[in-house]
């Protein structure tokens, strides 16, 4: 049996009112007023620097032999040199390990603190200030203070020994196997408040209705957390993880002030190696090539993160869209 | 006879005398009466008054300030804005200034081992013309003045004669029980060490970790380790490059030096792999160390009863030598050697140059190097060695040790690319010290990396600099 295909009746959307048009124009003007200074900064400050860096990375400039505008063009040779440099490879591995470990640590501690703090209670403001204090401390100060505390016969080992009752004397700063984890722990202490602030905002923004509904239906606290709150927090969690990861990949002040890449090369992360290459060895061109490679790596990570975030947002929007709108979307 | 009553004979004699005086160098009528300081003032006045700006670390600047104030009164030349940068960070900043050809700093106070790099980058003003105008000479002990030169020109004026001397605990090696214990164990008399092997035996025998007394107070961290390694390497008869600028570290002398360097791990504090001067100097002064090679300024600290628990408990002398080459060679080292360098792009370079000469005169630098509180500037001039003030600050034995070590002082790699050579060596030594790299691979790896540096900077260019580097090496193996 043939079924005649009848074209759907096209329902024309009503024309926006003058008020609506005026509102949309105001929003566009507002967006441009915010974006314009940032675009100007990008075009007139950042882009020239990026182009100059690209120039350096394509030309072999030996600083002792001549001016940079007379440097020899070498194409992608420097990029090849960097990508085949085992020391660069190890710096990438160390940076990834450092960033992953410190991001997870910051997130777990930040989330735990945020979960304790998101419901109002007496004295909440006081604890809020205490919890964010580490983030307000200058990283170099953190490094120098930590150095004094982390001596083998220093106060930290002494305190732990007294608490646990057996001798506890790791060489935090001179054992190459634990030097990088030591800096990681300092990073976690310094930046867990950042994750705390983001997660606190996320937890506070969760709508009450799904939680109340779950409570009425008799769900336990754990189930409410795991099946209601956590899914709603996914976009915020991704944001916290990505931002922290990018920051951790760029960590330099603590690592340099404390250990200068040592002992041996145990803490020679990407920023340390790029600093050494550019400002100790004065290999400006190779440093520029390294910086570009690292920037591209970060761009890939950010794009991946944005894709994940958009997917999370879409799934949340679908979950909470009004029934009619949901049907239209599904159609 | 004229109405002035001067005979022709008198007139002739006076004329001949003046002619002879004018022919002799530095003996203008003014020079007969003028000291070097006065000549410097006279020359500086021709440059005009100005406040010069500079990059200098405050512990170095503070004792200079009264001397600078005197110069300002006499010439109108003083110091205005100062950027307080540690001498360990100054090379990077100076290079940034050089690359941008910045006139911001009129002078920089920096490790003079950076002279080849900064001169190659076109940043430094040669000082010879100014020295000639003021009839100024760097009156340093031994050949130390040569450390300011590069390709025949002078680029710096020293303010801090950083030479390593040997420190040995007098109370420990003169103790009768220790003497007996040492003699029983080694069949030798316990006395001031003459070789690296002697020193190691003393360190092993006298250290007592239970009492927080460790054998060695020498540095082994990545940044400073090479400074010590060079002493061992040079004393074994080694040199860093051959005449074709091929790295010659990986030789028996080099491996000997690595072994000596690494064996100290057995007698050093377990955390010394990460220690720099802020950690080690207090340990030396507070008596937690048996022996060390260290910068000479620490003697001043040790002999200051207000700051040291070991005043009067130290013997100072020549750093250990080695018989490895078949003859006894001692080599001390000067690194970093702080000096005043002048920016070629500065509009006040003449004023900065004369200020440097003023600060670098033997007489003016005495109060600078003998300051009891700010002990960063160390004695280097001949006048310092006989000055009562300086002798009191360092102790007569300390001054004798400084003089002796100056006769056998050597530089680290005095070439363009110094920082890169230094950090590469430091990295590999540090990796071996903490067990990340086998000892036998240290110099093979360093040789490869150094040869790559030479290729990149330019073999021809570095070969031209080799003569300047070799000229700094001492002429004698043991002090006179």
Image (cartoon, coloured by chain):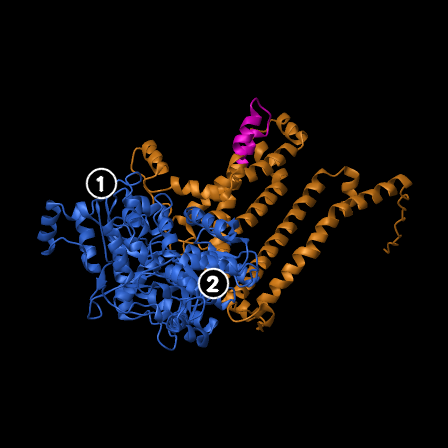
Chain colours: A orange, B blue
Task: Measuring from the top left, give residue B53's x and y in whole percent.
Answer: 53, 53
Q: Taking A56 as reference, is B367 left or right?
A: left
Write the start and end of the magenta stretch as one range.
A111-132
Q: Is residue A57 magenta?
A: no
Q: Is residue B419 visible?
A: no
Check the picture and name the quadrant holding the C terminus of chain B: bottom left
| Label 2 chain ID | A
Q: Which mark is residue A281?
A: 2
Q: Which mark is residue B62?
A: none
Residues A177 and A39: in front is: A39
| Label 1 chain ID | B
CB atoms of marks 2 and 1 within 8 Å: no
Q: Taking B252 as reference, is A323 left or right?
A: right
Badge 1 density bin: few <14, some 14–19, many ≥20, Cα 10 Å: few
Residues A320 and A259: in front is: A259
Check the picture and name the quadrant holding the N terminus of chain B: bottom left
Task: Measuring from the top left, give residue A40's x and y in whole percent.
Answer: 72, 53
Query: Secondary structure of the magenta portion, mostly?
Result: helix
Q: Is residue A124 visible?
A: yes
As helix, strand or loop, the secondary structure at mark 1 comes to helix
Residue that appears at 61% across and 52% down = A302
Task: Measuring from the top left, give residue B79's x and y in whole percent.
Answer: 51, 50
As helix, strand or loop, the secondary structure at mark 2 comes to loop
The part of the image, by quadrant, that contains residue B260 is: bottom left
How far apart marks 2 and 1 lie (CA) works out to 42 Å
Residue corresponding to mark 1 = B211
Total labels: the figure holds: 2
Task: Measuring from the top left, give residue B313's x and y in whole percent.
Answer: 21, 44
Q: Is residue A125 magenta?
A: yes
The part of the image, by quadrant, that contains residue B303 is: top left
């Amino acid at each position: 049996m043939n079924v005649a295909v009848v074209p759907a009746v096209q329902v024309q959307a009503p024309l926006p009112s003058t008020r609506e048009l005026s509102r949309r124009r105001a929003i566009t003007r507002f967006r441009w007023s915010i974006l314009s200074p940032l675009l100007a900064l990008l075009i007139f400050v950042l882009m020239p620097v990026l182009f100059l860096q690209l120039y350096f990375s394509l030309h072999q400039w030996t600083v002792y032999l001549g001016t940079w505008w007379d440097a020899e063009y070498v194409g992608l040779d420097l990029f090849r040199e960097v990508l085949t440099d085992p020391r660069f490879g190890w710096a990438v591995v160390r940076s990834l390990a450092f960033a992953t470990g410190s991001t997870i640590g910051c997130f777990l501690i930040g989330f735990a603190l945020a979960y304790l703090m998101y419901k109002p209670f007496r004295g909440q403001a006081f604890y809020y200030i205490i919890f964010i204090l580490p983030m307000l401390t200058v990283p170099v100060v953190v490094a120098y203070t930590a150095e004094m505390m982390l001596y083998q016969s220093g106060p930290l080992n002494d305190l732990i020994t007294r608490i646990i009752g057996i001798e506890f004397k790791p060489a935090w700063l001179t054992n190459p196997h634990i030097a990088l984890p030591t800096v990681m722990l300092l990073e976690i202490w310094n930046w867990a408040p950042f994750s705390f602030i983001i997660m606190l905002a996320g937890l506070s923004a969760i709508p009450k209705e799904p939680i109340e509904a779950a409570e009425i239906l008799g769900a336990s606290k754990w189930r409410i957390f795991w099946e209601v709150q956590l899914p709603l927090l996914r976009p915020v969690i991704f944001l916290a993880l990505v931002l922290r990861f990018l920051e951790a990949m760029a960590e330099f002040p603590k690592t340099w002030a404390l250990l200068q890449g040592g002992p041996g090369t145990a803490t020679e992360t990407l920023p340390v190696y790029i600093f050494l290459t550019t400002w100790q060895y004065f290999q400006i061109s190779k440093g520029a090539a390294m910086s570009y490679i690292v920037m591209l790596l970060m761009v890939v990570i950010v794009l991946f993160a944005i894709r994940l975030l958009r997917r999370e947002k879409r799934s949340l929007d679908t979950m909470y869209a009004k029934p009619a709108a949901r049907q239209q979307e599904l159609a | 006879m004229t109405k002035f009553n001067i005979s022709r004979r008198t007139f002739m004699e006076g004329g001949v005398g003046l002619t002879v005086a004018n022919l002799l160098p530095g003996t203008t009528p003014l020079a007969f009466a003028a000291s070097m300081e006065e000549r410097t003032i006279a020359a500086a006045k021709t440059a005009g008054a100005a406040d010069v700006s500079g990059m200098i670390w405050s512990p170095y600047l503070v004792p200079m300030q009264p001397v600078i104030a005197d110069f300002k009164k006499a010439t109108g030349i003083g110091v205005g804005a100062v950027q307080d940068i540690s001498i360990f960070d100054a090379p990077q900043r100076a290079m940034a200034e050089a690359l941008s050809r910045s006139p911001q700093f009129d002078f920089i106070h920096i490790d003079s081992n950076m002279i080849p790099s900064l001169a190659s980058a076109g940043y430094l003003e040669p000082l010879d013309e100014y020295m000639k105008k003021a009839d100024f000479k760097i009156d340093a002990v031994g050949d130390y003045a040569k450390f300011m030169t590069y390709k025949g020109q002078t680029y710096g004026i020293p303010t801090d004669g950083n030479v390593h001397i040997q420190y040995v605990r007098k109370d420990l090696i003169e103790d009768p029980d220790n003497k007996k214990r040492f003699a029983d164990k080694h069949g030798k008399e316990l006395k001031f060490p003459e070789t690296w092997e002697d020193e190691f035996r003393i360190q092993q025998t006298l250290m007592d970790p239970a009492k927080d007394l460790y054998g060695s107070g020498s540095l082994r961290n990545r940044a400073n380790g090479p400074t010590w390694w060079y002493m061992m390497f040079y004393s074994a008869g080694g040199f860093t490059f051959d005449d074709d600028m091929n790295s010659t570290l990986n030789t028996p002398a080099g491996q000997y030096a690595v072994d000596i360097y690494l064996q100290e791990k057995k007698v050093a504090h377990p955390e010394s792999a990460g220690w720099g001067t802020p950690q080690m100097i207090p340990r030396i002064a507070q008596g937690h160390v048996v022996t060390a090679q260290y910068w000479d300024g620490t003697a001043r600290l040790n002999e200051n009863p207000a700051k040291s628990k070991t005043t009067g408990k130290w013997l100072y002398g020549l750093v250990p030598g080695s018989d490895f080459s078949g003859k006894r060679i001692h080599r001390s080292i000067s690194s970093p050697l702080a000096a005043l360098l002048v920016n070629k792009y500065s509009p006040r370079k003449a004023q900065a140059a004369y200020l440097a000469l003023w600060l670098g005169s033997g007489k003016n630098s005495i109060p600078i190097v003998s300051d009891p509180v700010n002990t960063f500037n160390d004695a280097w001039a001949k006048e310092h060695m006989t000055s009562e003030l300086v002798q009191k600050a360092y102790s007569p034995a300390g001054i004798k040790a400084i003089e002796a070590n100056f006769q056998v002082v050597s530089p680290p790699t005095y070439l363009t690319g110094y920082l890169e050579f230094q950090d590469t060596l430091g990295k590999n030594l540090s990796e071996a010290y903490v067990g990340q790299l086998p000892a036998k691979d240290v110099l093979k790896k360093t040789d490869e990396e150094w040869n790559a540096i030479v290729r990149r900077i330019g073999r021809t260019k570095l070969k031209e600099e080799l003569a300047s580097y070799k000229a700094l090496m001492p002429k004698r193996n043991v002090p006179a």
